[in-house]
Amino acid sequence: MNSLKSIFWCCLFTTLVLYSCTPNLEIENNWSVHSPNGKLTMVIDHLSKTDSSLVYHVLINNATGIDTVLSKSTLGIVRSDDSFTKGLKLVAASPSVEIDETFQTFTGKRSEVHNHALERVFTFETIQGNKVEIEVRVFDDGVAFRYIFPEQNEELHKVTSEATGFDFFKKGKAWIQPYDSVTKWTPAYEKYYLNNIEIGEISPNPNGWCFPALFQTGNNWVLLTEAGLYDNFYGGRLENTFSSLIFTIRLPEKTEANGLGSIEPEHALPWETPWRVIVVGDNLATIIETDVVKKLARPNQIKNTNWIKPGRASWSWWSDHPSSKSYSAMVPFIDLAAEMGWEYTLIDANWNTMYDGKIEDLVAYGNNRGIGSLLWYNSGGPHNSVTEEPRDLMNDPVKRKEEFMKISQWGVKGIKVDFFQSDKPFILQQYLDILKDAAEYQLMVNFHGATIPRGWERTFPNLMTMESVRGGECYSFAPEYPELAPSHHTILPATRNVIGSMDYTPVTFSDNEYPHLTTNAHELALSVIFESGWQHMADRVEAYRSQPEEVKQFLKDVPSTWDDTKFVRGFPGKEMILARKKGDDWFIAGINGEAVQKDFSNDLAFLTGDYEAVIIKDGMDPRTFSIDKSNINSSSKVDLRMSPYGGFTIHLKKK
């Protein structure tokens, strides 16, 4: 067995050496694509000399040498008229093409993204003569591939299954979220991430696992997800059998969306599937700082973007669920936003039944105070049974456009659309149609009770944020949430928030139905730890007004968009420290996910120049702060102490 392993490693090493010396060299039954810096490689091969099924390997060249991240992972997809899984013959292989571009973003970890990758396209033919292209793109921090049916044919073709696999082949740890069974109120992406479990554990839910999924195997970190989902396709998920280190793609459940719509997508040819994405690095910074999902999305389709303005919003629902039906209850939240310099207020469900005033007058009141209004909508339609209003508008193209025209004339700035509860193709198409129609009427969008981000915010930059997270609202109805939240918070920056803006609704100092265990300094830090193009500050008006002046000033200063993001230190489930840059300022935040006190000495080598720092950290008890001011530069070390479930923030202003 050891001799076979030696032969395997020798062959892989020889492949890399030969390719690096002669980039266009083809080795029989073996095709490779490398990252621009040469650190990552994806190799496609036949399973064996006698089996023409395709497999791929992902390799990383790290400090210990060439390491295999995924091995003999299956490739292939099945249409109703042909199977592209076996009997495949290579008929063409493109040369390596460099992608090197920079594009601007409205939301996310940085305002400018450098998209640099090498790409090759391999064309295979089935026994029946049908073709499939496997397009491979390798970045310095990840690998992506998709299937393309290149022929011209107006007849609809149906995808019935997918053979794509991810074989970790050796033990490791996982931070992975069970795909929930859809109910009336809960979509699939609102379970807790299981923390530091063994790779191979079977999902406690029969529906498998959600994207994104985080793994630590050997010296490497790996994040699996998907991107670039368009053209009437399904949203994929993962499944594995008990004790198996192999994950495969699973289609949506037939029962989703009240049983409406097919799980099998149909489309004329040519047709592109979503990208299967493997973010890979030998440190956690690679995962947290990546923009691969956004790089794989289609470019911006909105010509005039001057009206798209991310921002902070006050939100009344967390502390007073019926408040959105009352004009008088909403006015203080508009006033709070004006006091804090926040840009928006969110008027949640059932605003159309407002009993003590008119919604259009409330919108006008906000506009007069410089505060934009965001209105809630039910996505149904017959695909959900939630009765919250307004409903039966977002699923009807004619009514939807009429509604958008009306509220845009009122001066509404954006919408929150809730309760989608399926990743079937027709529901995913509804998301895209809403984004297109909203852009026509200059409305920004938040998808709540929703699927995960897949890069749509690049294509439609009016998409500000998406939920797909077990968020702060759970303090209202989940008795276990306070105990799980501290650890949960440290996992999200390395999982869900990696792939796109996340509408967690943070910074709640006061208690709801189930009281916090996190400290107030921890809660304040979430405004930096969690990235969202619209950051909904969820607490009561008085909870913010009663804070120390330095805390209120921090909440006035902290932005919702960033020019850069750095991972400072941390480990999912334990603690997380991030630094985010806006203009000349840096905002550094840390949270403790464990019930023990922690002391840190942080290196700030990423700084340039001298800064005035305001440090807000845990006080003598969980509901108080300790506030320091000092001068800091790149050679400084900041010594910090976090209480059990505690946290801190540092605002660095350039001198």
Image: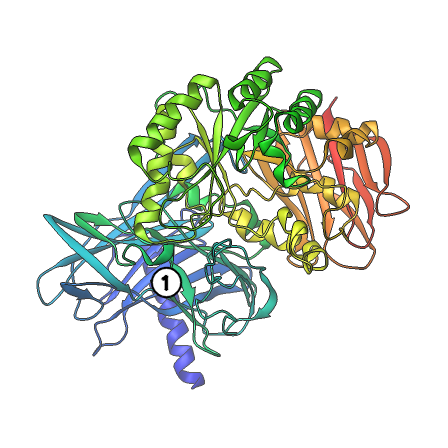
Query: Closest to the observer: 303 or 110?
Result: 303
Task: Find the residue positioned furthest to the front.
Answer: 355
**Which quarter of the rendered picture does the N terminus lie within?**
bottom left
Residue 345: which quarter of the image?
Answer: top right
**Image-based side of 647 in relation to 535, left or right:** right
Numbered label tally: 1
Within 10 Å of disc 1 (Cα), the crowding (few <14, some 14-19, many 20+) is: some
Colouring rule applied to residues: rainbow
Question: Residue 14, relative to residue 429: is it above or below?
Answer: below
**Image-based side of 77 in relation to 591, left or right:** left
Residue 157: which quarter of the image?
Answer: bottom left
**Which quarter of the rendered picture does the C terminus lie within?**
top right
Find residue 611 and report its horizontal and vertical position in percent: 75, 27
Query: Closest to the observer: 65 or 71?
Result: 71
Task: Find the residue positioned furthest to the bottom.
Answer: 1
Find residue 450 and report its horizontal and vertical position in percent: 46, 47
Question: Residue 168, relative to residue 468: is it above or below?
Answer: below
Query: What amino acid is labelled 1 in the image?
Result: Glu
Find residue 444 and report its horizontal and vertical position in percent: 46, 29
Judge whether residue 76 can be spotted in this image.
Answer: no
- Residue tagged by mark 1? 253
| Local SS, label 1 | loop
Find residue 524 and report its horizontal and vertical position in percent: 73, 39
Query: Closest to the observer: 265 or 403?
Result: 403
Task: Find the residue positioned furthest to the top.
Answer: 368
Question: Residue 530, relative to residue 593: is it above or below?
Answer: above
Residue 90: which quarter of the image?
Answer: bottom left
**Image-based side of 456 in relation to 339, left or right:** left
Judge whether residue 168 can be spotted in this image.
Answer: yes
